[in-house]
Structures are given as structure tokens and as C-alpha cells.
Amino acid sequence: MININNISLQRGNRILFSDATLVIHEKQRVGLIGANGAGKSSLFAMILGQLEIDRGEFTLSPQLRVAHVAQETPPLDTKAIDYVIDGDKNLRSLESQLLNAEEANDGELIAHYHTELAAVESYSAASRAASLLAGLGFSEAQQHSPVKSFSGGWRMRLNLAQALMMPSDLLLLDEPTNHLDIDAVLWLEDWLSKYPGTMVLISHDRDFLDRVVTHIAHLTQKQFTLYKGNYSSFEQQLAENLRVQQAGFEKQQKQVAHLQSFIDRFKAKATKAKQAQSRIKMLEKMQLISAVQANSEFRFKFYKADKLPNPLMNLSKADLGYGEKVILRDVNLSLGPDTRVGLLGLNGAGKSTLLKCLCGDLPALTGEVIRAEQMKLGYFAQHQLEQLDVSQSPSEYLYSLNKKATEKEIRSFLGGFAFTGDMALESMQHFSGGEKARAVLAGLIWQRPNVLLLDEPTNHLDLEMREALVLALQEYSGALILVSHDRHLIRSVCDDLILVAEGRAKHFSGDLDDYLIYVKNHKSAHVKVENDKLGLAHQENYTENAGKSTASLAIKQKIANAEKTLANLQAQLDQVNAELAEPAIHLEKNKDQLKRVLFSQAQLQKKHATQEQLWLNLCDDLEKNL
């Protein structure tokens, strides 16, 4: 499938790959991991033919259909659902050719393109696109809104849906969970786990990798190493490899010291000169084992806040919203120095509204919001990366926040965020998203906040930086409110969970795993409502311990009936297709008959697609009840 053999690649003064080798076989789902700037995105560019290697051999299976997520989204008037369908370029091409054939009144070509469209299941394209959009958090109204009406994060979701819509043999995804909520991440995990082709996925979300990939390709020190298994398995294998490497290094160093000692003692003695020369040659031929280096260059912690009043902030019976529109009612929340809260909730439930109130950007409509005089807020949000003055260096950025700081203090502090040497002094104009996020985090911590509001802080951060942030937050002494799709981060730093749902923000009594069950149940209920609208009512879910046997029997009967209906529809379709295969029907004199048969074919295809979806839903219900 993908064969990379001893390649080398240099961009500017940076060497990304040096004699690197990687082979990815068909059907493998590979998680590509490595530090920011290691060359992961460059590998994608190479696979897509956008970047040429300097040396080595790179081959890709011929006639491979490759899907990837576009990085730009033009401000189009096109409806979101049509934009997603555009991802199936072959379908759109066939539709265009059919239109031309109809304008030319060419019956033979019309029949041909109808057959081709049936082969690519064009009749189900709209429902497939709607399913993708719903999974990624788009409401029915949003699906029919123009692309230009969406913000940057939502446009990235549209691009992701468009990539998933394209029939492909190889799927390339670069940080697909950025800009997604937990509910959308869970949906994407399920979708990708069933993807039938080969996939290469860049991600720094360990839970996501654990549930999706079959292999891990670790890019480090300009080389690829492929590990079988998910991310947790990779961590165990890597730890064992490093243990063996370190043991080998220590053993070899003793051998080197012994040889060198003999050489130093006897190389000047005539009687031992030959033996000394022999040992010198042994040293020269020895392939030295490297010592295991620290696996993270990030070392930082939050400064202790100057003051920690209790409470730091208090919301009492607060209604939150915009104008006359109330989003959240009767919010009661007290933030003390020991508050560690993760905000949970489906997309659009009101998490952003609550954060805007907490940071002071949105006044409460009713109720009371009290902030302690000595409260010092630190707020991380994605828009801050866009507002960063990239003409500054990281050093200048920190100095602008505290002009009393010395250069030594600033440089030492920035070193913990891997801004060392010239990097601390160069403009952030050409920094990657991860480097800019690190700079914003550094500025946040530099100001010694006693209340932290973090809205998706791990977007663009690699695994090592994420782990460093986890360790720093665990030692943080102020109040913390966190919104994140990174489940590892939530589990590691949050003591309490608040569920924002149905116009309320209330304590969630379960843990994060319980919330994941809540999300899946909510999705199932939503799908049931939507299917009811289409006349595809599901068999109602039964509780785990009661009624499953009866439910299973009922579902099995419905499946049997659906299969009979499908067989009947398929027989009718076969008959219609046989009529269309007859040359005589495409003669000019039989034009009306051709139209009737084509109409019949289209109606049967729609009925078949609807019945097939019902059958699939019933099979899913049966699996849940077994």
C-alpha cells in the first residue's frame, strides 16, 4: 500500500527524515505520532504528491483513491449538505454527465449514466451526507445553511465530513478531533473503527488512538518505528524497548571502559602493542548504543497565586443568554481555590455561554454574579491564538505582560515550554499552531492567575506537551474550569463534572465513563426520533436486565420481514435493469417507454435504500439486545 524506503527530506535548514523507512499494508489503521514539527504533516504532503523527497524511494499503490481533509473552506453560498456531497467527486461527475445527456436527449447515454449512478448508490447520497453531518454535531437546520455562515471551527467539521463522504481506499486525517466536542469525537471513533480501507491518522489524543488504530508509527529522531496495537500498547512496548536500550548502553559502556583501560595501559609496551591494537580495532568497529534521553523537553509549573480568596467567584440563580433569549436558567456555581470542574454537554447546550459569563464577556440576564476583588482570571480560548501578535517573539510577548521581569527570568521560564536558544527571540509569524498554543499557555501561566478557564487547551499540542500540562494542572493551586474533548486530561485534573444540558448547568453525579454512556444514549434517542420522521421507527430499547428476550424475538421477526421486502424490491430492480439493457428501448420511437422505465428504476432504488436502512437499524437494535 505505502512503501517508504530510506527516504531523506529537508525543509529549509531542518532535516525531517534521514534514511527513514516505513511500510503500511492494506487495511491497517495507523496512528502517526511524534513531536510538533517532527514532519508528520510533511509526510502527508509527500503522500499527496505535494512534496518531493530529497533521496530514497516512495511508492504508493497505483489507482488508489485517497481522501484527505481540505485545510481551507471558501465562503460559499452552497448548502452544507450539498458541500459534503461534493466530496464524492465521481458522483458529482456522473450527475453532470447525466445532465448533459438529458440536454442532448441521448437516450442511450441517459440509461448508461443512470446505471452508473445506481452503482455508486447516488440515491442514498443525501441521507449519507446528512448522517455524517448529524454525527459531527450539525442540526437539521444547519445542514441546509450556507457554508459561508459557519465559523472556522465548523467549516473544518464540514471539510471532515466531505472527506468521509468520498469513497476511498486510503484516508489521511490530520488532527480530526480538533474543533470537535466529546459527543462528535465518540461518533467519529465509531465511524473510523468501521472504515474498510487503509487509514493514516495524526492525533495527540490517546483515548481516540486507543479506540481507532491498529498500529502506531512513531516518528522520532528523523526515523519511523511501527508498533502493532493501539496507543496504550505502544507505550508499553516503547517503555520495554527503552529499558532494554538503557541496559544495553550501560553494559556496553562497561565494555568500552574495560577496552580503553587496557589500551591506555599497554599501547606503549612492545610486548602488548599487538593486543592493544586489536582492542583499538574492536572499539572502532563497535556500534555504540545511545543512552536513553528524557522523553519530554517540556518542564513547567504554575506559579503560586499571590492571593486565594474563598470564594473566588459565585453565580447565584443566574439566567444566562443573549437579549431576550435565555440559554441557561438558574445557574448556581461557587468557585473556591480547590474547585476542579470539567464542563460537559452536547454541542450547542450552552457551555460557551457559561464560559463567557465566567470570564466577564457576558453579563447575566438575571441573578447575581460576584467576583472577589483579588480574583485574577486566566482564560485560554482558541480565538486567542488568532489574536496573538505574531510580530513579537515569545520573549517580547512575556515582557509585554510583565515589564518588571528580567531577560534571564523570561528565558528561563520559556525554556520549560521548549522555547530555547534563538527560538525564544524569533518572530512567532512562522510558528506552527502548536507553538503558538504553547506561547499563549506560557503567557497565561506567567500572569499567576488564581482562576483558570481553559476552553480546549490541548488543540494543536503534541502528546508530550499535553502530559506536561496535565502534571502542571495537577499542582495548580487555584480554581479550574475545563472544557475539553481530551478525556485523558479531564480524568487527570477534574474532581467534579458539571453537565450543561436542557437549559441547566448541574452537577453530574457519575464519572466520565458514565457521561460517555449518556452521550451514546442521547445519540440513540435522537436517531430514533429522526427515523420515526422517515417512517423507520426502531424497536424501543429495553433495559439490560428485563425484556431482552422478548425484544430480540420481535426484532428478529422484523428483520425477517425486512429481508423479504428487500428481496422482492431487488427482484423488481433486476427486471427493470434487464429492460434497460435491451437495445430497442433506447430507440427514438421508444422514448416515452424509456422515461417510464427510468422513473420506475429511480422509485425502486429509493424504496430499496429506505428498506435497507430499516434493516440496518433493526440489526443494530438486535445487537444491543443480545
Image: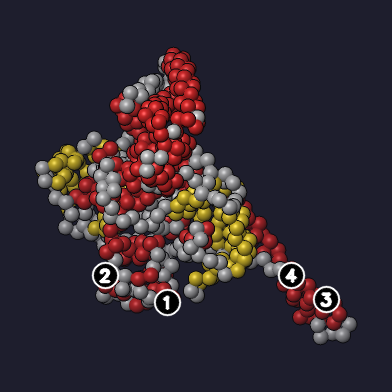
In percent of the image, x 35 and y 71: which residue is there?
Answer: 429
Could you tell me if the residues under marks 4 and 3 are in contact, i.e. CB atoms within 8 Å?
no
Camera sees residue 609: no
Camera sees residue 244: yes
Look at the numbered disc 2 and give the secondary structure of its residue: helix
- Sequence-wise, the earlier of marks 2 and 3 is 3
Q: Which residue is mark 1?
A: 422
Q: Which residue is mark 4?
A: 286
Quadrant of residue 299 within the rendered picture: bottom left
Q: Residue furthest right?
A: 271
- Sequence-wise, the earlier of marks 4 and 3 is 3
Q: In the depicted view, which residue is nearer to us: 467 or 121? A: 121
Numbered tag placed on residue 401 in the rendering: 2
In percent of the image, x 30 and y 54: which residue is there?
Answer: 152
Task: Estimate the spatial distance between the alpha carbons at disc 1 and disc 4, rounded to whole Å.
Answer: 36 Å
**Amino acid on which the number 1 mark rests in the picture:** Asp
**Amino acid on which the number 3 mark rests in the picture:** Ser
